[in-house]
Image: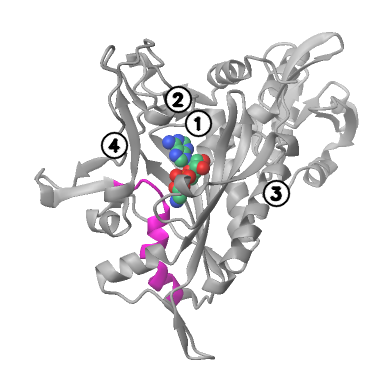
Amino acid sequence: MPPDDLLERVVNLCKRRGFVFPSAEIYGGFRSTYDYGPLGVLALRNVKDAWWRSMVQLRDEVVGIDAAILTSPKVLEASGHLTNFTDPLVDCRNCKERWRADDVAEACPNCGSTDLTQPRPFNTMFKTHAGPVEDEGAEVYLRPETAQGMFLDFASVLQTTRKRPPFGIAQIGKSFRNEITPGNFVFRTREFEQMEMEYFVPPAEANTWFEYWCAERMAWYQSLGIPEDRLRLREHDKEELSHYSARTADVELAFPWGWGELEGSGNRTDYDLKAHSAASGERLEYFEPSTGERYVPYVIEPAAGATRAMMAFLLAAYDEDEVGGEHRTVLRLNRRISPYAVTVLPLSKKETLTPVARKVLALCQPHFMCDYDETQSIGRRYRRQDEIGTPYCVTVDFATLDDMAVTIRERDSTDQVRVPIDGLVEELRARLPLT
Ligand code: GAP
């Protein structure tokens, strides 16, 4: 059973070990923004790589793009975001706090007052100006989702790749939303990373592909170590659907505060392509040369958050147990997600061991993300690596100087095996996944 204060323990570990720091902490932090530290940046990159591998690398019908973050108001007007991308906001007349209406039951969570305004729509897009003049004509938005880039580049991708439906365009990148109540660590922030794929299909096949992608995305989280019983798929009611969606289902995780959205898969129909076609005057459709048929594809969109997913993997991996009568904290992260795959540890800091240990490190570095640690007792160093989820430690000891072999220690079982240095990379390769 996860501890009651799991979130607090994971947040502490993240800060103490360099996964995630509050941004601008020397100034007391800045408006729920976060920085990813030396370990967080590796884990986050691994989450994104695992997504890219499953959504792009292992498929021949999906290609990637990296579109601009600065977005024209024309795009967001056509997509409906200028009018519809709103959250209902209520003000507390007593303490002047502002809340998302869905976070407030009867009374203000801050002061308990029931003297609240009626909910009113609050557009959550960030607006700024391009160029030196700050007038209306210079207004630009930070994109609130990566998805629009895929619709804007639809015709160029079709033309340059000659793909035919069903095919997908994928993108990973930052999105921005002026959330009224960011919180629960990096679960909801104003600046975050998304991993989205727009899958263009013949309209008659939309429901089949919607169900296909819902199942695929559930399986992805499980394949990376989230237990099945902590995940569920929840389909949205009609009233809950976004302005562009005919159907949406969320992959939800049992977060410490209850079930919460990890990602959503939507059937966006032909809403976006038609809207951009009407507003831009460009034809955004598919022409099938073999039949002479022209149509606007429907879009199935699995839309995930990279930063939220990283948090989910950390929460699911956090564990405490005993090894040899000693308490340890261990992140049972999937090997694809762990910041380091391998850590090289000389048994002691003795001059005779260091050059051999450094040689072992140099052997491993081209193949795996490696750490090297030579300070404090070997037991403490194993604990430190367990706490950050490193699946394998490679220990160089005095016997190594005679037999040119090292010990591989596995994180979860703490089992150890002795292998010759010249077979080490091969042995680790067999145990670690390809990236
Ligand atoms: N293009 C569709 C779309 O953006 P969404 O459900 O609003 O759909 C997709 O966002 C995913 O992006 C969410 O499931 C979540 O993982 C992540 N996400 C959305 N808002 C976020 C926020 N404020 N902070 C962190 N992640 C967020």
Marks 2 and 4 sit apart, C-alpha to C-alpha, by: 18 Å
Marks 3 and 2 sit apart, C-alpha to C-alpha, by: 27 Å
Instruction: Look at the image and give the residue range highlighted in magenta.
Output: 142-158
User: x, y (%) of residue 129?
Assistant: 18, 44
- Report the residue marked by disc 2: 183
Kindly state the secondary structure of the residue where label 3 is placed. Answer: helix
- Report the residue marked by disc 1: 187
Task: Find residue 359 and report its image quarter.
Answer: top right
* Kind of residue sitting beneath label 2: Gly
Specify whether 135 is left or right of 158. left
- Report the residue marked by disc 4: 122
> Residue 219 has which mark?
3
Q: What crowding class fits label 1: few (fewer than 14 Cα within 10 Å), some (14-19), or many (20 or more)?
A: some
Kindly state the secondary structure of the residue where label 1 is placed. Answer: loop
- Going from N to C along the chain, the mark reached first, 4 or 1, is 4
* Kind of residue sitting beneath label 3: Ala
